[in-house]
Amino acid sequence: MSANWMTSAFDRERMHRFRLQRTDETMKKLNLDAVVVTTFDNVRYIADCRPYFSAVYYVNAYVVVLPRNGQPIIQGPVVEGAPMGLAPPVKGWQGYPMIPVPAIAPKWASMVSTILKDNKIESGRVGFDDISFMSYLEISRSLPRIEVVPAFNAMLDARAIKGLDEIALLRKAAQIVDIGARAGLDCIKPGVREREIVARMASAMYEAGSEAEPWATSLSSGERALSSVFASDRVLKDGDLAVFDLGSIYEGYLGDVARTGAAGNASREARAIYTAAYDALMAGTKGVRPGARSSEVDGKIRQALIDAKCNVSPLSTGHGIGTGAPEIPWITPREEGITDFELKEGMVLCLEPRTSKDGIAAAGCEDTMLVTESGHEVLTHCTRQEHLLIR
């Protein structure tokens, strides 16, 4: 696969076959007669359906049913190609209710049960990635001979190694998020409001082809960055650092980058904090290669921050990325109950150290990278503001 990463042209049908093959392998491992997925990332992965994002995830009520050796069956409130681009017709329903699924669990379960029965699946093992407890009870009642099998982790495993076409889309998503980040850095000046910078980044990404923002773009500056990541009406002052984290979506695949910029002339103390974040990112990036453990990469990042006598974020220092985030591998310390992943060729991940010093400033820096046969390739290339570094 390595030799084709830079030259392979995107082929949607090939990608769809690859993703169904990965899902089929998962179904065989779990001995499933069908798999039912509801999360945005798995819906996109299996059915290639662009979901309609909502701040309240359980309202959307997307469901994809994939029988073994069959094709995905999609139901949801907004499906491209359906009448008016809205919901496909559902047997026995007069419409598609935009109502929280737990509130209509019997009706939702009846839809899934009907699809399974129409595909002659009334007994056996059916995997579910994520459903509400009420929906689980109703599925169990309507299909008493079905064994409900947890499939969330197995689907994450299936998506961990990217195919050629997925990597092509992740490259494009990285290019788009780079454009947004450059626009943000250009706006970081004294007298500019935090929200203005966020608006400019979002506009630049949409103009470059982003479908949506996968999360609320974070940006905070000056002393606010010591206690908040959310953008406000604060006006940047000379010497402020402003740190942001933003994402893009291209054909279902996510781009992710974080950068820190300076409004005017940053103090030496503030620049030292940014230097620590930058050095931590570089230390972690050097450790990304096949065979490395996620905890080893995390340790390199944390140690760099400790050596610089800066605060270490309580959050993970990185995560996998694809049709969702976080994906495998998550970059965390070795801890009971959390898998310490071995990095493998074809994984795509983000490293995102964030740090601060009390009473001074906060800083962060993040890149997206591909694990290659010999090491890694960084996919995000927006300037890392090396002129701020203290050397």
Image: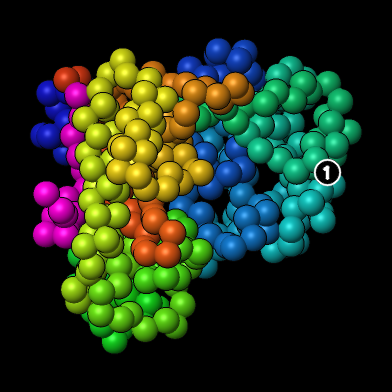
Residue at image point 16% right, 38% down: 9
User: Quick check: is 288 in the magenta stretch?
Assistant: no
Residue 299, percent across and down? 38, 29
Residue at image point 61% right, 49% down: 62
Residue 334, percent across and down? 49, 23
Q: Quadrant of residue 348?
A: top left
Magenta span: 375-391
Q: Is residue 91 left or right of residue 275?
A: right
Q: From the viewer's perspective, is residue 297 above or below residue 224? A: above
Q: From the viewer's perspective, is residue 70 above or below residue 321? A: above
Q: From the viewer's perspective, is residue 112 above or below residue 390? A: above
Residue 229, percent across and down? 46, 63
Residue at image point 88% right, 33% down: 141
Mark 1, residues whose alpha carbon is within 10 Å: few (<14), some, or many (≥20)?
some
Q: Quadrant of residue 135?
A: top right
* 127 and 65: which is toward the camera: 127
Residue at image point 37% right, 48% down: 310
Q: Is residue 81 left or right of residue 179?
A: right
* 62 and 384: which is toward the camera: 384
Q: Is residue 2 left or right of residue 201?
A: left
**For the image shown, how many numbered marks are present on the structure?**
1
Examine the residues drawn in magenta and state their main secondary structure.
loop
* 110 and 154: which is toward the camera: 154
Q: Is residue 218 left or right of residue 165?
A: right
Residue ranking furthest to the bottom = 191
Observer able to see residue 54: yes
Q: Which residue is mark 1?
A: 134
